[in-house]
Image (cartoon, rainbow, N blue to C red):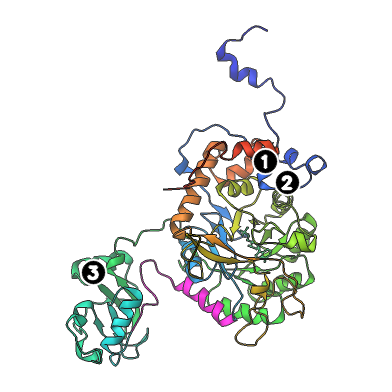
Amino acid sequence: MSVLDHTQALSVLKEYKERDGLSAEQLLDEQWSGGLTYNDFLILPGYIDFPAHKVNLESHITKKITVRTPFLSSPMDTVTEADMAISMALLGGIGIIHHNCSAEEQAEMVRKVKKFENGFIMDPIVLSPQHTVADVKDVKEAHGFCGIPITDTGKMKGKLVGIVTARDIQFQSDDASTLESIMTTDLVVAKQGITLADANRILFTSKKGKLPIVDEAGCLVSLLARSDLLKNQNYPLASKSPSSKQLLAGAAIGTREDDKERLALLADAGLDVVILDSSQGNSIYQVEMIKWIKANFPQVEVIAGNVVTREQAATLIAAGADGLRIGMGSGSICITQEVMACGRPQATAVFRVSEFARRFGVPTIADGGIGNVGHIVKALALGASAVMMGGLLAGCEETPGTYFFKDGVRLKRYRGMGSIDAMTKVNSKDGNAATKRYFSEGDTVKVAQGVVGSVVDKGSARSFLTYLITGVQHSLQDIGCLSADAFHKAVYDGQVRFEKRTAAAQLEGGVHGLHSYEKKLYA
Ligand code: IMP
């Protein structure tokens, strides 16, 4: 064979009938491969002609809602409460608040997300003039600060009458003295509605430690802290409702009668999207619930599921679902496939359901089994508009629960909502099982579908999510796609190519051959 001139390489390439690798359809051809998981394949690299930071990850999570970061946090009681939901929304995704609690508690968490204003502390510690120096010392001991606003009621929304600072109590030897006698009453305050930039400016020039924000009547509505001045970053990706400019809030509910009352409270708190939370969503209960929500709360977008087949998806799409959640048995804490013999390997489930749902303009969310950046990209490659993560985020500071040490490692508890532990939690209001995801919570014999475990400390969600976003951008750069939309299009056009991974290929693709190593994921 004669050697061709190098300048002919690109034209000779065109002579090949097929591109290297497989199309998504060929990869997922069940006749040859059965069901695939994320680890069973790789995406072949493309051509890079743009920097990674230009990659746009904007995606629909429902027919109407677009987010800039295609990430959702799971509605689990060790993953998403208000703090996590706020961080998720600030970084461009959305947190789905769990429902293993009373409807009132869940609505309060939604309200906290909707009311959140970046930089403003909405629930600061507040004392009254009748509290004592000892109380201030207790706050300092527990929280490390003692700049405390004083209102007539000792609560938020009370009339602001003073502020107590470290200097006020410095030389106070009598712990029983009331704050009335020592608090500073010469106050610098700002009016509700002030922008963060203006409030920061006042804080800066006033040289005060705290800036109370008051309403027209002089009642305390929030607080700004000097110590946060440098931390009050901008969040250009933040997910906000276009009309109110408030952060987007999501929450999960079940499909029982009392869930209708729950939804009414959530909607009243400003809920944007509700997830019908079931491990097997193809049911008459979801069909009826979707129709009821559409008739009664048309402003709330409904994500139904979970589903793993086209047949399941069709029922929910026909009922009016605005988005679908895909996954059965792929979660890190999940024993559903083992116990129920039902489920589907996640890569196949995501591809089959997404390919069907896109025909109706219904976005899909790949839920469960996301263990790293690569899994996120693979889920998007298979047609998901976004991913939902539980275990990957559970170790973040903003999740419920406290850290503990085991064998020298800092850990947080993470439990399946179908674990006996979670299913036996009762609602403080009526004594009934609080969650209703598995149709088993109210039974005498509860059949577990999840376990209780722990995950390692991930630091702040805001840093960790930034790492995930940047990681996905770099991956799409390798693949040669400038946006999540372009990626989907290129997959369905057969431009993005895939390859299956043998067991040996999987070993080769991981760290191997080292005596020991440290795996640090980002800096
Ligand atoms: P992970 O991200 O792999 O940890 O999976 C989280 C997902 O697992 C959740 O979003 C739920 O869909 C699912 N899940 C939560 N609790 C359970 C359980 O107890 N059994 C099975 N699946 C669960």
Instruction: Please state if 24 lies on the left or on the right of 163 as rendered.
Output: right
User: Circle 1 is placed at which residue position?
Assistant: 41
Splitting the image into 4 quarters, where does residue 150 fall?
A: bottom left
Q: Amino acid at mark 2?
A: Leu
Q: CA distance from mark 3 to mark 2?
A: 57 Å
Q: Give the vertical position of 196 relative to 14 (above or below).
A: below
Q: Mark 2 and ligand 1: say if the CB distance to the nearest ligand atom is below 8 Å.
A: no
Regarding mark 1 in the picture, which secondary structure is present there? strand
Q: Earlier in the sequence, mark 3 or mark 2?
A: 2
Q: At 69% across and 71% down in the image, what residue appears?
A: 437
Q: Left or right? Give the position of 143 relative to 19.
A: left
Label disc, if present, on residue 36 of the rendered structure:
2
Q: Looking at numbered disc 1 in the image, what kind of residue is underneath it?
A: Phe
Question: In terms of image quarters, where does ligand 1 lie?
Answer: bottom right
484 relative to 217 in the view: left or right = right
Q: In front here: 432 or 73? A: 432
Q: Is residue 164 visible?
A: yes
Q: Are marks 2 and 1 in contact (CB under 8 Å)?
A: yes
Q: Residue at x 51, y 54 (%)?
A: 68
What stretch of residues is rendered in magenta? 103-126
**Residue 361: image location, x then y, percent:** 67, 54
Question: Residue 303: x percent and y percent?
Answer: 65, 64
- Quadrant in the picture for residue 235: bottom left
Q: What residue type is disc 3 on?
A: Ile
Residue at the (23%, 78%) spot, across then down: 165
Q: Secondary structure at mark 2?
A: loop
Q: Could you tell me residue 281's position as x and y percent?
A: 74, 65
Magenta includes 40?
Answer: no
Instruction: Sort mark 2 into few (<14), some (14-19) or many (20+) by Cα contacts within 10 Å.
Output: many
Residue 43 appearing in the image: no
Q: CA distance from mark 3 to mark 1?
A: 55 Å
Q: Which mark is residue 202?
A: 3
